[in-house]
Image (tube, coloured by chain):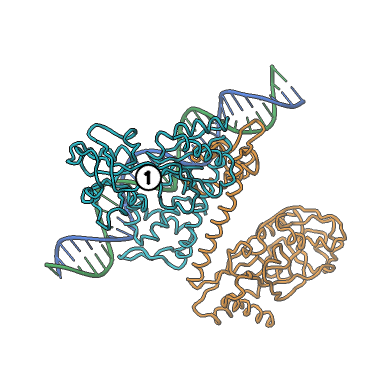
Chain colours: A cyan, B orange, C green, D blue
Amino acid sequence: MDVDTRLLRYFVAVAEEGSLTRAAERLYVSQPALTKRIRQLEAGLGVDLFTRSRTGMTLTEPGRTLAERAPALLAGWERALRETRSAASRAARVLRVGFIASAANEATQPIIAEFARRRPGWRAEMRQAAWSNPSAGLADADVDVALVRLPFPGQDALRVTVLFSEPRCVVLPEAHPFAAREVIAFRDLWDEPFVAAPPETGRWREYWLAADERDGHPVRVGAVTEQPDDWLSAIANGYGIALAPESAARFYTRPGVVHRPLTGVSPSSVGVAWAPADDGNPVVQDFVRCCRERRVAT
Amino acid sequence: MDVDTRLLRYFVAVAEEGSLTRAAERLYVSQPALTKRIRQLEAGLGVDLFTRSRTGMTLTEPGRTLAERAPALLAGWERALRETRSAASRAARVLRVGFIASAANEATQPIIAEFARRRPGWRAEMRQAAWSNPSAGLADADVDVALVRLPFPGQDALRVTVLFSEPRCVVLPEAHPFAAREVIAFRDLWDEPFVAAPPETGRWREYWLAADERDGHPVRVGAVTEQPDDWLSAIANGYGIALAPESAARFYTRPGVVHRPLTGVSPSSVGVAWAPADDGNPVVQDFVRCCRERRVAT
DNA sequence: GACGTCCATGCCGCCAGGTTATAGGCGCAG
DNA sequence: CTGCGCCTATAACCTGGCGGCATGGACGTC
């Protein structure tokens, strides 16, 4: 019997949710479509995978058997996919560099230039990642190396070299009362609503909310954004304020938004990260070396 | 990216054959269909998997990467499939019994009856296998236990208990000159064309051609068949003669075909086989016990 | 220069898989 | 006991993917 990864994902979703209706919304398909696909899977296998009832779908014994194995099958495919893509970029002499918006800022250009000098024939392919992905794709092996802001979740499973630090400042709407001050103390911002990164970014989100510097004082979140554009808009529209690296004042600004120096928060570090598997990869190590040298220059 | 097992099998076939045209005939699809599917795979991955030339399709480096992993992915799916089916039959209290046509003959009915007595609530599901599958599905884990004729390829990886033996006889078209004889010496049949099992059955095929009893004299194969019906037809139509267990005279016969005793060939053994993984499976072991007891009775 | 052997392309038909709307079973609240 | 809310199943319809056939185009061979 033939099956595709989508069908397997459908099955896993239904198994996990215990309900066609809920699984359908999670998968962004209609419930009848799911009904039919699951029945098709059962028919193809010649096995009843679920028992239906008004309370939902419960796995049968063979259903549990399949449900135990399906995630590994999907993971195996994802893995093969990544390795194939990885081989393709290597064969094409392309180094995939992930970076998070505002990670390296003015350091980025010289780093790539230096890499181009050191590795003629190779090309660095820059991929900007959304904030929901603070390892810039490195955790999923979508890139070979990443320029990141520290700390971020999953960091311990990767190699990270710190490149430099810069102070964090605050970004406010022009009309904000504090916009008139030259320097702001973080304490005064404790009760302000903040524009935050998505919750799944964990430690990274907390770092940019400066959760550690609030003495346990709770955070008010006024909006959640994934990208610099939305982020600036949210601030301009008064949904909240936000912390940012100092260099953001030069890279991410727009009318209606002002940057102000801040006291009472630690500076932010930029790092270059790679997977332990690439410890011996000369191209990756060359790139890291380029980063280190630029650090001195900056 | 989503993919289905068929697409993966297509890819593996092209990779192995090194040619769309040849892979297409092996897969029983048209060459244009394969062209399109492979291009779709490449487009989906964003990777060139093959380099095309007039001599065929050669894997690229990333293509090789995928080609190394694809068979394992397919095998993983097949395995999950088998385990799920297996769990289903266990849950339904069904013992899947494979048997090869003419394996047990009159012993089969009493065995099932005995099993039904010993395991009330359980049902033995009999599945006849073609001769191209002399383990009757046990090698592929399609059944839990199998009634087989020995020897067969793959036998060493399974547990086998011999149940009984019976002489082999010869099956001839009525019009054959030897049909008049009461008893035939195998020597006299060396130059006769035989109706044989498919070549992939290896040892099993050779056993029924009595290759070991020909002193190296080559075999003439007049036809290849997979099932008793075709087999009898082939003999009746004069494509060749064949060896068969004595009991085939009672189970597999038809007008125009006669069975005659034979000297000079070893007898044929019937066995019951199961997978080593089921050594501790009480239901399987009960079935085996039923077989052993019937052996004494027969 | 005709032919053979590859892979690619154009065109068409069919069905798998999606959508919306609706039916139907059953528990629960009023 | 009736209406509502939670499920899943069914019906009717539409679209696009995938397969088939016929043909094109590149290139080496005889």
The secondary element bearing badge 1 is classed as: strand
Q: Is disc 1 surrounded by few (<14), some (14 to 19) or many (20+) residues within 10 Å?
A: many
The chain ID associated with circle 1 is A
The x and y percentages for residue A134 are: 40, 46
Horizontally, is B209 left or right of A41 in the view? right
Of the 4 image quadrants, the one containing the C terminus of chain A is top left
Q: Residue B115 vs residue A179: left or right?
A: right
Q: Is residue A1 left or right of residue A264?
A: right
Asked whether B87 or A169 is in front, the reply is A169
Horizontal and vertical percent position of residue A94: 54, 35
Is A151 situated above or below A295? Answer: below
**Residue at horizontal 26%, vertical 48%?**
A186
Q: Is residue C8 above or below residue B193?
A: above
Q: Identify residue for label 1.
A: A268
Could you say which quadrant of the image residue B258 lies in? bottom right
- The front one of D21 and A76 is A76
Which residue is rendered at x = 54% and y = 48% of the image? A80
Q: Please state the horizontal and vertical placement of residue A54, each as a whole percent of the image.
A: 30, 65
Quadrant of res B33: top right
Q: Which is more toward the observer, B47 or B159?
A: B47
Kind of residue at disc 1: Ser
Q: Position of residue A189 (x, y in %)?
A: 23, 48
The reply to whether residue B254 is in sight is yes
- Asked whether residue B235 appears in the rendered view, the answer is no
Q: What is the quadrant of residue B165 in the picture?
A: bottom right
From the viewer's perspective, tell me whether residue A63 is left or right of residue B18.
left
Asked whether A144 or A39 is in front, the reply is: A144
